[in-house]
Image: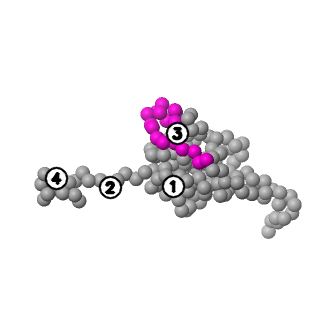
Amino acid sequence: MPKNENNPNIKNNNHQSPKKRIALTAGTFDLLHPGHFNTLNFAKKHADELVVVLARDETVKRIKGRRPVIPEEQRKIMIETLKPVDKAILGSLTDKLEPILSVKPDIIVLGPDQTTYQLEELKNQLLERGFKTEIVKVEEYVKCPFHSSYDILKEIIRRWCNKEIELK
């Protein structure tokens, strides 16, 4: 502990370790693909700690018109095990800003195809609630054969219809 400047024999009790920088990102994270990892790695590079907010099953159904394949508690467990992620939490069913205001991140990272939050709209909504934070959007969109959960689902259905997949 550092010594008091006026009396070197007295220790300062107000010495605190530097504040950890917290990043927050959000999404469904249903069927994992390279785009998810790109967003998580990008977010982690901007902070010491990464918190991921997972969309609730009910919320996904309302926004996308279908339930996720993987239930929310299982998606939470999967996301928490990924290297860049320090903590995963379920989103709110009533207020999409609630988890952000609870975590109080230093930076919010939006995925390249994020539609639930628009950067300026989110910034303004948070300011209206008295919370100011940095918000960035991942610019690089990972293009690969299965770059979305929806594309993975379509491929599974295609293989099923072509009898490439059998139930055992």
**Quadrant (top left, top right, bottom left, bottom right) of the N terminus:** bottom left
Q: Give whichever of discs 4 and 1 has the lower sequence position.
A: 4
Q: Give whichever of discs 3 and 1 has the lower sequence position.
A: 1
Q: Residues within 10 Å of mark 3 (few under 14, many from 20)?
A: some
Q: Residues within 10 Å of mark 1 (few under 14, many from 20)?
A: many
What secondary structure is marked by label 4? loop
By what rule are the colours in the image chosen? one colour
Q: Which residue is mark 3?
A: 97
Specify the farthest residue to the bottom: 168
Residue at 52% x, 42% y: name it.
135
Mark 4 and mark 2: Cα distance apart in space: 19 Å
Mark 3 and mark 4: Cα distance apart in space: 44 Å
Mark 3 and mark 2: Cα distance apart in space: 29 Å
Is label 3 or label 4 in front? 4
Mark 2 vs 1: CB contact within 8 A: no
Q: Which residue is mark 1?
A: 44
**Quadrant (top left, top right, bottom left, bottom right) of the C terminus:** bottom right
Q: Amino acid at mark 2?
A: Ser
The label shown at residue 5 is 4
Q: Amino acid at mark 1?
A: Lys
Q: Which residues are magenta?
A: 122-139
Residue at 66% x, 50% y: name it.
141
Mark 4 and mark 1: Cα distance apart in space: 37 Å
Q: Amino acid at mark 3?
A: Leu
Q: Give whichever of discs 2 and 1 has the lower sequence position.
A: 2
Mark 2 and mark 1: Cα distance apart in space: 20 Å
Q: Residues within 10 Å of mark 2 (few under 14, many from 20)?
A: few
57 sits to left or right of 120: right
Q: Looking at the image, is 77 positioned above or below residue 119?
A: below
Q: Residues within 10 Å of mark 4 (few under 14, many from 20)?
A: few
